Amino acid sequence: MLGTAALPLIVTAALISFTPAHAQDIPVTQENTAAAPDVDSKSTDKDTTVVVVTGTNIKGIKPVGSETTTMKREEILATGLTNVTDVLRTLPQVQNTGDPNGATMREGGTAGYGGNSTQGTTINLRGIGSSATLTLVDGHRLAPSGAALTFTEATQVPIAAVERIEIVSDGASAIYGSDAVSGVINFVLRKRYNGAEVTGRYSVNKGADEKGVSATAGHSWNNVGKFGEGNAIFSMDFTDRSAFARNKSPYLMQDLTRFGGLDNRINGATATPGTPGNIVVTTTTYFPVYGTTYNTYGLPNGTNEHLTGADLLAAPNLVDSADYADYIGALKRQQYVFILNQSITPWLDFSYEGFYTHRETISRALYTNSAIKLTAASPFYIQGVPGIAPGADETVQYNFYKDIGAQTTYNPDTTWTQTASLKARLPKSWSADGYATFGRDATCGICNINNNVDVDAFNFQIAQGNINPLSSTPLTDAQKATFIGTNIQASTNKMADFGLKFTGPLFSLPAGPVRLAVGAEHQYNEQHLSNGANRGTDNHFQWDNITTSNRTVDSAYLEVFIPVISRDMNIPLVQDINLDLAGRYDKYSDFGDTSNPKIGITWDVNDELSFRGSWGTSFRAPSLTDTNANVFSYAGIFPFPNNSGDPNIAQAFPGYSYALMFIGANPDLRPEEATTWSAGFDYKPAWVDGLSVGSTYYDIAYDNQIVFQPTVNLFLSSPENRAVYSKYIHPVDNTGCVEGDSSTYDPELAKYVALPNLYGSTVGQVCQVQVVLDARETNMAATHQYGVDLHATYVRNTSYGFLNFGGSVTKILSSKQTIVEGTDAISAIDHYSYPVSLRGRFNAGWAKNGWNVNLFANYVGGYLNDQTLSDNGVQRPFQKVKANTTYDLGVGYMVPQDSTSFAKGVRVSLNIQNVLNQAPQIVLTNNSAYDPANSSILGRVFSLQLTKAF
């Protein structure tokens, strides 16, 4: 083990950078090792080339028909990035748009009560949703993360433990089962390493900094007692990042008037009040700077016990929440990986792989409330407020900062995965592989410990005359104790996965042996969620819901590799043709079964040119949180606009019907389904030594996508929409209805009233209902996307040094989305919040005598901002957002391997992301001045890394 004295050493390695390599790319060879040294230089592996394993169950072959992109370890280090998620987001195929469920799964995308309450990270291939991208570690599944919304955390393992990352941007449910719709990401860990290395790193941007240290140690042996050869490797990584406060960037302020936007410190009837707060009054006058028709009067400083309207200030008291909130929270993370391989007998091998991550994220937010009520009976009631009728309720905007400070959300997350496997070499070149994987993730999505406000209790204390909401005087501890408490949403996700696979040759054809893989898999998944908070006028803590859901999945699969033509057959224009047929059957305990085939073919014309193609179907099963209404459900009854013209839907008053609306999880969800196909080529011309080019055309038809109802406001807006959304609209005849007696309810109404309703209430109102609107999650959307991936690399060894140039480009040619069956498809690219159709990353590098310099260009194409802000209900003209290019630079040095000094094994690098410090383009919407999906407000980021190998 490494001693603690070694830990302060700083890191890393900017080694020669290639564009992410593809399955057929040139491996690191002896003549270019000075430029691209083998990072695991002490590895005992005899074959140092990349062996592609993702995308097939058959040993000894490359995936047939599908393109596999491989980011080797030296390429990962050359980016200068410090976690695997950020590395993957450099790929043009990865989009940073939100998911169909509305969540934005990246740190800083949301915080606290947002869709990403646990501050997790995911990868979204093709931009059709991160849940459609399967994430694996060494080919094995992982326990989900999240609370009310579950996902697979992308930052599963540290870079110190990663040998390479393999990406298959193609459907692969025939191989892996659920989630492999747009593709598969497989983190392949380092397996053999003799020696030790320690890495330290430091990075800084204009708003925060990050410190980290990692270490890896490994050892191999020939014999241990009666056992044969084996090896072990251990990696650990520690990260400490400061918070990035929102006020460090003008783009993150509420007041966006400097960019031509609105001052969002006031937004309709809500505001970010100062101390003391404000009185808000409804008017018909439009205030353009705030974009609202509400008038807000400021309260004067003082105890304010007997105010009149004449005492109020004409201007509101406002603060900017960015001064009290974080864009990216402070983070402390520790990660460990341990791998053991041991030969038990000449024919049986054992392996163990375990990894563990503990992360703590702490984010600040400003807690205010713009709906504190004062009745005429309150001793604090203000007489004579302009615009408020005598005796009418008054609305106070209140800032709790003087009472609780900034509200802190604590997001701990602990995850571990362990896999034990046995590999047996059987007669006649067959083998058997069996494994057992166990994983667990425990997190807290909303953890406001002793700084959460019980608004009901606060209003009760005001009504009792115990708290004056108009005063600027801080409350006493006794007063605060009456309404301050805790809010917790804790979740545990468990996973067990067992598999057994046999693979080997069946028989031989003239082109070679036909190989078969056949196997079975059993999975168990469980989620336990507990949600509780201080509730009620007495501010007591209660559990709102404690729920556990689980499922089992039994699977069987088959894959056949058929060599049709080989080079030995001497057929013109055909060197090799290989065919791969795969199929998988999955049976779920909670919603049924699904079968998915895949066909792949590869045609090698000669050593220079090859073609490939694939076709298959894929699926994504609804998550346990998608189907469990005891995780999230809400129902409420209120007047709803009704212009449907349906005589079966009665109206309470002209243009409105009383509606019972349900939102939340839905146990009747079906799997999402997709049909995918691709075709491409790879070309390495002999007449241009070192050049490699390739392209892939892909097509994804994705149906039954699970979404939160995005169009519920349209349900009854017209007779045409009434017909389109008919499956979600249920007219109610409440003749003879008796409140509280469900036997007298309309049958359709009774069915919905009986559903779980965690956060709403229908008590005393059921007999008013005239229509039920089902706005729960549903299999509504369909997406059809097709496009082209292009890549090229050129490497050349010259007397001036080793040169490399490369680029990868993704162009989405079309992406159409149908929100609900029966409506017209809309364009789902090149609009705000949708994927950008053209993205690229390019690089140029030079290396000689241990030195290397790498320049990267990151291109994001232009698109249309069709969510421009509105002035008095009138939307501003759409904005054309220009294409954008940022540049990254890396400079590194590695002490030569033949050095005899202590410096041998030292690598040092300086990397600069956004080297020109390019600011985001101004993209104005009602609440933002830039587009976080396609630009960054971090500015120039410096990263210094130092590594010492022993």
Image (spheres, rainbow, N blue to C red):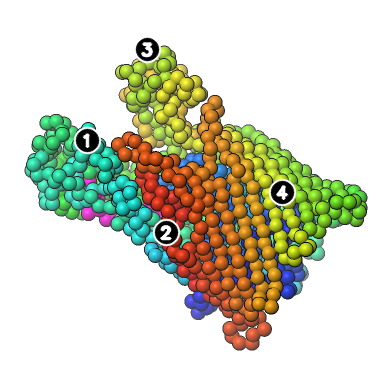
Three-letter amino acid code at the position of disc 3: Gly
Residue placed most toward the observer, 52 or 842: 842
- Residue at 43% x, 33% y is 663
Residue identifier under label 3:
736
Say few, some or many: other residues with alpha carbon within 10 Å of mark 1 (under 14 / 14 to 19 / 20 or more): few
Looking at the figure, which quarter contains the C terminus? bottom right
Percent from the top left, x then y, of residue 232? 66, 68
Three-letter amino acid code at the position of disc 4: Gly
Q: CA distance from mark 4 to mark 1?
A: 61 Å
Magenta stretch: residue 403 in it? yes
Secondary structure found at label 2: loop
Secondary structure found at label 1: strand
- Residue at 27% x, 39% y is 292
Residue identifier under label 1:
285
Mark 1 or mark 3, whichever is nearer to me: 1
Q: CA distance from mark 4 to mark 2?
A: 37 Å
Q: Which residues are magenta?
A: 398-411
Residue identifier under label 4:
680
- Residue at 51% x, 72% y is 910
Three-letter amino acid code at the position of disc 1: Thr
Considering only order in the chain, which callout, 2 or 4, is on the residue closer to the N terminus? 4
Residue identifier under label 2:
919
Q: CA distance from mark 4 to mark 3?
A: 67 Å
Q: Within the image, what quadrant is residue 466 found in?
A: top left
Q: Within the image, what quadrant is residue 597 found in?
A: top right
Looking at the figure, which quarter contains the N terminus? bottom right
**Any part of residue 284 in sight:** yes
Q: CA distance from mark 1 to mark 2?
A: 36 Å
Q: Mark 1 near mark 2, Cβ–Cβ under 8 Å?
A: no
Say few, some or many: other residues with alpha carbon within 10 Å of mark 4 (under 14 / 14 to 19 / 20 or more): many
Say few, some or many: other residues with alpha carbon within 10 Å of mark 2 (under 14 / 14 to 19 / 20 or more): some
